[in-house]
Image (cartoon, rainbow, N blue to C red):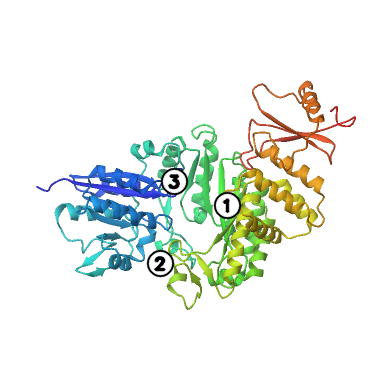
Amino acid sequence: MNQPLSAVICVLNSKYIHSSLAPWCLLAGTDAYCEKGITVKIIEGTINEQIEKVAQRIVAQNPQVIGFCCYIWNITATKQLIRLVKKQLPNAIVILGGPEVSYNAGRLLREESLIQYIVSGEGEKPFALLLNAIFKGEGVQNIPGVCYRDGEQPVISSPYISAEEPPSPYTQAYLDALKGRIAYLETSRGCPYSCAFCLSGRCGGARFFDVERAKKELLLLANSGTQTVKLVDRTFNANRKRANELFGYIIEHYGTAIPKGVCFHFEIAGDILDDETISLLATAPTGAMQLEIGLQSFNAETLAAINRKTNVERLKRNIQRTVANANMHIHIDLIAGLPYENFQSFAESFNTAYDLKPNMLQLGFLKLLYGAPMRDNPEEYPCEYEQTPPYEVTKTPWLSSEELLNLHNTEDALERLYNSGRFRRTLEYLLKKGGQSPFDLFYQFGQFAARKGTERIPLDEYTALVFTYFSTQKGIDKSVLRDVMVCDRLATISTGKLPAALRIEDGNLKNAVKALEQEEATRPQKGIKRGVALLYTENCAAYADYDTKNPITGEYPLFKVPMVGGGDKI
């Protein structure tokens, strides 16, 4: 009779709020396919905590086998963790899996002597069968997706793609471990696209799980205590009929079986949205859903080069329509460093995307992942990139290293000014009166801010930086800019206090506060904090009550009341 086998599955998440689904999928696989006598536990950590503490948690279990889930954001820390654990458990068998190791197993097996096996591709069944083989002392040659050494020589297996629907990871143990963190829901695998920079197309075409299973798990996660259920399907609306059924299910049950306040996040292809889907999404309760729409670029030559067929005009119309509904957060993204995208072309893509008025415009940078066609075909896709994770592109034939560096400063300005939601009115004013394109505004201010230094800068100091820079720009009235920035501040920061750069000492402010409190229509509700400021260019008082935020913009309602008699009365 075989001796019991103890195994641990470990993952280092990028942040505590994230709850990796992979170890729970593997655990579900062991429950479905492992022999009796094999016990498996999960240990989660983050890349931001002391690796020694994670190692201690693993060692305390005294496992004979340790599996690690590997991604670009955690592979460096994971290798460090392996070294720490193996010092104390030298006989433990180490197994790696995940997208960061699935397509470079040979290199890892040659260079990392502490690693015994790599599971390439989908892991539920191969990992369980590998544990069975270790448990019974059998060979692993016939286990799909398992890479190993034969003496010193790596033996590589093709990434495993299952034809079966995987077992559900959503056990009570998973729910107990979630503790209000972001929950990830998988209702399909694979992708209908084959973008040259992405791995999803290498995972097979889109395979959809049973729709009734998806509904059941959707309800389970919605009632788990989380505020966000993020669908990990690469293109959720690839099957329109199925997507509409699930969208409709959420809309129908929101506020009853699905608690109010829970938000569902979907990654979709915007150009394949049809009128029926857009009309259905328009009926969703405000804040119930978020859409993430990958643009990559608006350059037709670029899109063709990365094998992403997109009806650009239809894409733009569909984004405009979903944004106009104002009932869900719309997130779109661009990627810098793609083929044939030079500085001017990227600026044009940026301006086109900005004019669509998404709630978030992400400026990302191309990363050449192991297994991605762009990495595997350097002659077709010539570029320089970092040799260590996350393998970010540093130079292309179309973008210099200096231009890419400057685009990082542009990204910083975009994140702080636009994506934060804290300067919405300010940006509208600056773009209307300053005469700059959106890209020029973020680019030029980004360079200025970088010279001043923005790392760990407090919001008040950053606000002062914005006011100082833009108040001297052509076409900008400093007094109007101050008032607009005050409105943004009141609507987004619940302290009600203005930063020093925007504060004006004026006794009339107390009079305005009293007048607001005396009028029944403007009297604050008991227990609700309020922020009040005087706007001199509009001769009015502005106030915000910090009670309920808009779930889309994150803002508190802002009100303005005219002043008469020199500001002493309202």
Among numbered discs 2 and 1, the one appearing first in the sequence = 2
- Say whether residue 77 is left or right of residue 403: left
Name which residue type carries label 2.
Gly
Q: Circle 3 sits on which residue?
A: 184
Name which residue type carries label 1.
Glu
Nearest-to-viewer mark from 2 and 1: 1
Name which residue type carries label 3.
Tyr
State how far apart marks 3 and 1 are (Cα).
31 Å
Position of residue 241 measured from the top left corner of the image (x, y, whole percent): 51, 51
Dot 3 falls on a residue whose secondary structure is strand
Q: Residue at x 54, y 54 (%)?
A: 268
Q: Nearer the viewer, residue 280 or 200?
A: 200
Image marks 3 and 2: residues in contact by CB distance under 8 Å: no
- Say whether residue 290 is left or right of residue 190: right
Q: Nearer the viewer, residue 128 or 517?
A: 517
State how far apart marks 3 and 2 are (Cα).
24 Å
Among numbered discs 3 and 1, the one appearing first in the sequence = 3
Q: Circle 1 sits on which residue?
A: 455
Q: In terms of image quadrants, where is residue 111? A: bottom left
How many neighbours does mark 2 have within 10 angstroms: few (below 14), some (14-19), or many (20 or more)?
Answer: some
User: Which residue is the extreme one toward the left?
Assistant: 1
Among numbered discs 3 and 2, the one appearing first in the sequence = 3
Image marks 3 and 1: residues in contact by CB distance under 8 Å: no
- Count the marks: 3
Nearest-to-viewer mark from 3 and 1: 1
Q: Is residue 311 above or below residue 80?
A: below
Q: Nearer the viewer, residue 238 or 346?
A: 346
Position of residue 193 measured from the top left corner of the image (x, y, whole percent): 49, 63
Q: Residue at x 25, y 53 (%)?
A: 86
